[in-house]
Image: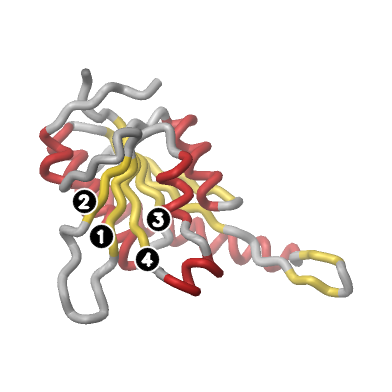
Amino acid sequence: MTAFKHILVPTDFGESSRRALDVAVELSQKLDASLTLLHTYEIPTYDNSGMVFATVDLLTQVEESAQQQLEEALVTLRKRLPDAKGILRNGVPWQQILAAIDETHADLVVMGTHGRRGVAHALLGSVAEKTVRMSPVPVLTIRAAAHDGRDHANVVKAADSSGETATPQALARLPHESAK
């Protein structure tokens, strides 16, 4: 058994992603693990008479904006973890997360979840849910704060093939078998 060595943190720069990054940084520091911040963006397309397209100007603007957000997040992150890395990807987020797990040899994913339920979940799907279901490594999901004023910073779920759950503190204490 070995400890986690590389943590992948997908981000959409939202509240739940920020909370997940905080947990990931804490774990990285406790475990002496490297950390990679991943941002995936999708290019919006327009349907006009059966033709789907996106203009070059739009492609450039979306990519430049995504790159700028990632760079700003990395500047802040590197104040806490100087060796943190960043990856920018274009594509379907959950698919890009799975590809990044393989490419970076990450052995833990820490990611935010919006906690959508009902119709919103059915219509929008869940990147976190698809990642948890398809990931070859454990995934720790962090919920955003509830709108009712309760603090859900400690409401987390680590999912692996065993289906057990753990807190970040327990996760940091327990070794696991490296998924290779």
Can you tell which of label 4 and label 2 is closer to the viewer?
A: 4
Q: Foreground residue, 17 or 60? A: 17
At x 24%, y 46%, the residue is 24
Where's residue 179, x and y in %? 36, 24
Q: What element carries label 1?
A: helix
The residue pinned by badge 2 equals 23
Quadrant of residue 5 within the rendered picture: top left
Q: Earlier in the sequence, mark 4 or mark 1?
A: 1
Per the model, the C-alpha gap separating discs 3 and 4 is 12 Å
Q: Is mark 2 on a helix, strand or loop?
A: helix
Counting residues from the N terminus, which is met first, the one under dot 1 or under dot 3?
Answer: 3
Q: Quadrant of the C terminus?
A: top left
Circle 1 sits on which residue? Answer: 19
- Circle 4 or circle 1, nearest the eye: 4
CB atoms of marks 3 and 4 within 8 Å: no
Q: Residue at x 75, y 71 (%)?
A: 46
* Residue type marked 4: His
Q: In this view, does 149 lie to the left or right of 68?
A: left
Q: Mark 3 points at which residue?
A: 11
Check disc 2 and give the amino acid type. Val
Residue at image location 31% in from the left, 63% down from the top: 16
Label for residue 114? 4
